[in-house]
Image (spheres, grey):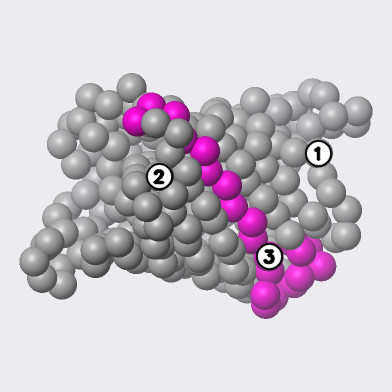
Protein backbone atom coordinates (compact mmCIF):
# COMPACT_ATOMS: atom_id res chain seq x y z
CA UNK A 1 0.00 0.00 0.00
CA UNK A 2 4.46 3.08 -2.67
CA UNK A 3 5.42 6.06 -4.35
CA UNK A 4 8.44 8.33 -4.62
CA UNK A 5 8.36 10.94 -1.90
CA UNK A 6 9.91 11.77 1.46
CA UNK A 7 9.98 8.75 3.77
CA UNK A 8 7.18 10.16 5.90
CA UNK A 9 4.69 10.84 3.13
CA UNK A 10 5.51 7.64 1.25
CA UNK A 11 4.71 5.41 4.23
CA UNK A 12 1.56 7.37 5.03
CA UNK A 13 0.18 6.94 1.54
CA UNK A 14 1.13 3.29 1.20
CA UNK A 15 -0.24 2.28 4.62
CA UNK A 16 -3.47 4.19 4.85
CA UNK A 17 -4.87 5.48 1.60
CA UNK A 18 -6.25 2.05 0.63
CA UNK A 19 -9.30 0.55 2.37
CA UNK A 20 -11.98 -2.09 1.95
CA UNK A 21 -12.02 -4.95 -0.59
CA UNK A 22 -14.67 -7.45 -1.52
CA UNK A 23 -14.82 -9.97 -4.34
CA UNK A 24 -15.47 -7.48 -7.14
CA UNK A 25 -14.56 -4.32 -5.24
CA UNK A 26 -11.40 -2.26 -4.79
CA UNK A 27 -9.03 -1.13 -2.05
CA UNK A 28 -6.02 -3.04 -0.72
CA UNK A 29 -3.64 -4.09 -2.14
CA UNK A 30 -3.98 -1.10 -4.47
CA UNK A 31 -2.46 2.24 -3.52
CA UNK A 32 -5.39 4.02 -5.14
CA UNK A 33 -8.46 4.03 -2.89
CA UNK A 34 -12.13 3.47 -3.72
CA UNK A 35 -15.41 4.94 -2.40
CA UNK A 36 -16.90 1.61 -1.22
CA UNK A 37 -17.47 1.63 2.56
CA UNK A 38 -17.51 -1.49 4.71
CA UNK A 39 -21.01 -2.95 5.10
CA UNK A 40 -22.95 -1.67 8.10
CA UNK A 41 -22.07 -3.48 11.38
CA UNK A 42 -19.32 -5.48 9.62
CA UNK A 43 -15.53 -5.51 10.09
CA UNK A 44 -12.85 -5.81 7.41
CA UNK A 45 -9.38 -6.32 8.84
CA UNK A 46 -5.94 -6.54 7.22
CA UNK A 47 -2.65 -7.83 8.58
CA UNK A 48 -0.06 -6.59 6.09
CA UNK A 49 3.67 -6.56 5.40
CA UNK A 50 5.29 -4.14 2.96
CA UNK A 51 8.76 -3.18 1.80
CA UNK A 52 10.54 -0.74 -0.50
CA UNK A 53 13.77 -0.81 -2.46
CA UNK A 54 14.82 2.80 -1.92
CA UNK A 55 18.13 4.21 -3.17
CA UNK A 56 19.24 0.71 -4.20
CA UNK A 57 18.91 -0.76 -0.70
CA UNK A 58 16.06 -2.63 0.97
CA UNK A 59 14.67 -1.36 4.26
CA UNK A 60 13.41 -3.91 6.78
CA UNK A 61 9.76 -4.76 5.95
CA UNK A 62 7.04 -2.86 7.77
CA UNK A 63 4.18 -4.72 9.43
CA UNK A 64 0.82 -3.29 10.41
CA UNK A 65 -2.86 -3.85 11.12
CA UNK A 66 -5.74 -2.04 9.44
CA UNK A 67 -9.27 -2.19 10.88
CA UNK A 68 -12.36 -0.97 9.01
CA UNK A 69 -15.84 -0.93 10.54
CA UNK A 70 -19.17 -0.09 8.92
CA UNK A 71 -20.58 2.18 11.62
CA UNK A 72 -23.62 3.42 9.69
CA UNK A 73 -25.09 3.16 6.22
CA UNK A 74 -22.52 4.51 3.73
CA UNK A 75 -20.11 5.30 6.58
CA UNK A 76 -16.88 3.50 7.45
CA UNK A 77 -14.52 4.09 10.38
CA UNK A 78 -10.87 3.16 9.77
CA UNK A 79 -7.83 2.71 12.00
CA UNK A 80 -4.27 1.80 11.01
CA UNK A 81 -1.88 0.53 13.66
CA UNK A 82 1.85 0.09 12.91
CA UNK A 83 3.31 -3.05 14.47
CA UNK A 84 6.94 -2.37 13.51
CA UNK A 85 7.33 -0.36 10.30
CA UNK A 86 10.71 1.27 9.72
CA UNK A 87 12.48 -0.67 12.53
CA UNK A 88 15.72 0.49 14.09
CA UNK A 89 19.16 -1.18 13.99
CA UNK A 90 18.90 -4.93 14.17
CA UNK A 91 15.33 -4.85 12.87
CA UNK A 92 13.75 -4.30 16.29
CA UNK A 93 12.20 -1.31 17.99
CA UNK A 94 9.75 1.31 16.72
CA UNK A 95 11.74 4.35 15.55
CA UNK A 96 8.73 6.11 14.05
CA UNK A 97 5.48 5.23 12.36
CA UNK A 98 2.16 6.89 11.49
CA UNK A 99 -0.88 5.94 13.54
CA UNK A 100 -3.84 6.60 11.26
CA UNK A 101 -7.57 7.11 11.49
CA UNK A 102 -10.33 8.30 9.19
CA UNK A 103 -14.00 8.33 8.21
CA UNK A 104 -15.17 7.32 4.74
CA UNK A 105 -18.58 8.66 3.72
CA UNK A 106 -20.25 7.71 0.42
CA UNK A 107 -22.63 10.49 -0.62
CA UNK A 108 -23.47 9.36 -4.17
CA UNK A 109 -24.64 5.83 -5.00
CA UNK A 110 -23.71 4.12 -8.26
CA UNK A 111 -26.37 3.86 -10.96
CA UNK A 112 -26.26 0.20 -12.03
CA UNK A 113 -28.25 0.94 -15.20
CA UNK A 114 -26.48 4.16 -16.21
CA UNK A 115 -23.14 5.95 -16.04
CA UNK A 116 -23.34 7.61 -12.63
CA UNK A 117 -20.44 6.44 -10.38
CA UNK A 118 -20.47 6.10 -6.63
CA UNK A 119 -18.53 8.88 -4.87
CA UNK A 120 -17.11 9.22 -1.35
CA UNK A 121 -14.88 11.46 0.74
CA UNK A 122 -12.36 9.93 3.14
CA UNK A 123 -10.69 12.50 5.48
CA UNK A 124 -7.82 10.98 7.46
CA UNK A 125 -5.22 12.00 10.01
CA UNK A 126 -1.79 10.40 10.57
CA UNK A 127 -0.04 10.87 13.92
CA UNK A 128 3.66 9.86 14.14
CA UNK A 129 4.60 7.68 17.09
CA UNK A 130 7.89 6.16 18.24
CA UNK A 131 11.21 7.43 19.55
CA UNK A 132 11.91 9.56 16.46
CA UNK A 133 8.34 10.78 15.98
CA UNK A 134 9.31 14.37 16.88
CA UNK A 135 11.04 14.57 13.48
CA UNK A 136 7.79 14.01 11.58
CA UNK A 137 4.63 16.13 11.46
CA UNK A 138 1.03 15.16 12.04
CA UNK A 139 -0.43 14.98 8.53
CA UNK A 140 -4.02 15.28 7.27
CA UNK A 141 -5.42 13.98 3.98
CA UNK A 142 -8.72 15.03 2.36
CA UNK A 143 -9.42 12.96 -0.79
CA UNK A 144 -12.43 12.21 -2.97
CA UNK A 145 -12.84 8.81 -4.68
CA UNK A 146 -15.07 7.56 -7.52
CA UNK A 147 -15.92 4.07 -8.80
CA UNK A 148 -17.94 2.52 -11.63
CA UNK A 149 -18.47 -1.16 -12.49
CA UNK A 150 -19.28 -2.69 -15.88
CA UNK A 151 -19.88 -6.42 -15.54
CA UNK A 152 -16.60 -8.08 -14.54
CA UNK A 153 -14.69 -4.77 -14.87
CA UNK A 154 -14.35 -2.15 -12.14
CA UNK A 155 -12.59 1.20 -12.46
CA UNK A 156 -11.96 3.64 -9.62
CA UNK A 157 -9.75 6.51 -8.60
CA UNK A 158 -9.51 10.15 -7.65
CA UNK A 159 -7.19 12.24 -5.53
CA UNK A 160 -6.85 14.57 -2.60
CA UNK A 161 -5.00 17.31 -0.76
CA UNK A 162 -2.48 16.55 1.99
CA UNK A 163 -1.46 19.03 4.65
CA UNK A 164 2.23 18.43 5.37
CA UNK A 165 3.47 21.02 7.92
CA UNK A 166 7.06 21.51 8.96
CA UNK A 167 10.16 23.39 7.95
CA UNK A 168 10.99 22.84 4.28
CA UNK A 169 7.85 20.69 3.81
CA UNK A 170 5.17 21.44 1.24
CA UNK A 171 1.49 20.57 1.14
CA UNK A 172 0.83 18.25 -1.78
CA UNK A 173 -1.84 16.44 -3.78
CA UNK A 174 -2.16 12.72 -4.48
CA UNK A 175 -3.90 11.08 -7.43
CA UNK A 176 -4.48 7.61 -8.83
CA UNK A 177 -6.61 5.46 -11.08
CA UNK A 178 -7.13 1.67 -11.25
CA UNK A 179 -8.71 -0.85 -13.61
CA UNK A 180 -9.64 -4.25 -12.14
CA UNK A 181 -10.94 -7.43 -13.78
CA UNK A 182 -12.75 -10.26 -11.98
CA UNK A 183 -11.34 -13.44 -13.58
CA UNK A 184 -13.62 -15.88 -11.74
CA UNK A 185 -15.52 -15.98 -8.45
CA UNK A 186 -12.25 -16.25 -6.47
CA UNK A 187 -9.55 -14.41 -8.45
CA UNK A 188 -9.17 -10.81 -9.63
CA UNK A 189 -6.30 -8.85 -11.21
CA UNK A 190 -5.78 -5.13 -11.57
CA UNK A 191 -3.38 -2.41 -12.69
CA UNK A 192 -3.03 1.17 -11.49
CA UNK A 193 -1.23 4.45 -12.11
CA UNK A 194 -0.72 6.82 -9.17
CA UNK A 195 1.41 9.72 -8.02
CA UNK A 196 1.77 12.97 -6.12
CA UNK A 197 3.14 16.48 -6.37
CA UNK A 198 6.32 17.45 -4.49
CA UNK A 199 6.12 17.38 -0.68
CA UNK A 200 9.36 19.21 0.22
CA UNK A 201 11.22 22.15 -1.27
CA UNK A 202 13.85 19.82 -2.79
CA UNK A 203 11.63 17.00 -4.04
CA UNK A 204 9.71 16.88 -7.29
CA UNK A 205 6.43 15.23 -8.23
CA UNK A 206 6.41 11.53 -9.01
CA UNK A 207 4.37 8.86 -10.78
CA UNK A 208 4.33 5.08 -10.26
CA UNK A 209 2.60 2.05 -11.75
CA UNK A 210 1.51 -1.18 -10.07
CA UNK A 211 -0.13 -4.56 -10.51
CA UNK A 212 -2.19 -6.47 -7.94
CA UNK A 213 -3.87 -9.84 -7.41
CA UNK A 214 -6.74 -10.72 -5.08
CA UNK A 215 -7.73 -14.26 -4.15
CA UNK A 216 -10.68 -15.33 -1.98
CA UNK A 217 -9.94 -18.43 0.08
CA UNK A 218 -13.54 -18.37 1.34
CA UNK A 219 -16.08 -15.77 2.48
CA UNK A 220 -13.98 -14.90 5.54
CA UNK A 221 -10.33 -15.19 4.49
CA UNK A 222 -8.64 -13.50 1.53
CA UNK A 223 -5.06 -13.13 0.22
CA UNK A 224 -4.01 -9.94 -1.57
CA UNK A 225 -0.73 -8.59 -2.90
CA UNK A 226 0.77 -5.96 -5.18
CA UNK A 227 4.04 -4.78 -6.71
CA UNK A 228 4.77 -1.18 -7.71
CA UNK A 229 7.58 0.71 -9.40
CA UNK A 230 8.36 4.35 -10.06
CA UNK A 231 8.10 5.42 -13.69
CA UNK A 232 8.77 9.18 -13.35
CA UNK A 233 10.15 11.62 -10.82
CA UNK A 234 12.93 9.86 -8.94
CA UNK A 235 13.27 6.15 -9.56
CA UNK A 236 16.43 5.99 -7.39
CA UNK A 237 14.31 6.74 -4.30
CA UNK A 238 11.66 4.09 -4.90
CA UNK A 239 12.65 1.54 -7.53
CA UNK A 240 10.37 -1.23 -6.33
CA UNK A 241 7.83 -1.83 -3.56
CA UNK A 242 5.51 -4.64 -2.55
CA UNK A 243 2.57 -5.25 -0.25
CA UNK A 244 1.15 -8.56 0.98
CA UNK A 245 -1.88 -8.86 3.26
CA UNK A 246 -4.23 -11.33 4.86
CA UNK A 247 -7.79 -10.02 5.03
CA UNK A 248 -10.55 -11.38 7.23
CA UNK A 249 -14.13 -10.25 7.72
CA UNK A 250 -16.73 -10.74 10.41
Q: Earlier in the sequence, mark 2 or mark 1?
A: 1
Image side of residue 249 versus residue 106, left or right: right
Range of the magenta residues? 219-239
Report which residue position mark 1 lands on.
Answer: 60
Q: Is residue 238 magenta?
A: yes
Q: Which residue is mark 3?
A: 229
- Of 227 and 208, nearer the camera is 227
Q: Which residue is mark 2?
A: 186
- Give coordinates of residue 153: x percent, y percent: 32, 65
Magenta-drawn stretch contains 107: no
Q: Mark 3 and mark 2: span between their CA atoms?
A: 26 Å
Is the residue under label 2 in contact with that under label 3 (CB below 8 Å)?
no
Check disc 1 and report its element: helix, strand or loop: loop
Using the image, tell me which numbered label, if any, was put on residue 147: none
Q: CA distance from mark 1 to mark 3?
A: 18 Å
Can residue 249 be seen in this snapshot? yes
The span from disc 2 to disc 1 (Cα, nearest Å) is 31 Å
The percent position of residue 56, horizontal first and vertical second, equals 88, 60
Amino acid sequence: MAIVRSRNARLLYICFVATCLQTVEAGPPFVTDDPEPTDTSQFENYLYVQGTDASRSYAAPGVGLEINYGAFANTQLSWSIPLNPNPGPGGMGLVWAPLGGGIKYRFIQEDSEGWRPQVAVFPQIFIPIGSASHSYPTTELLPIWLQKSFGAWTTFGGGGYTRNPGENNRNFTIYGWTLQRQINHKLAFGAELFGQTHDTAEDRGSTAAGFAALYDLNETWHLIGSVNTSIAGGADNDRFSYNLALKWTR
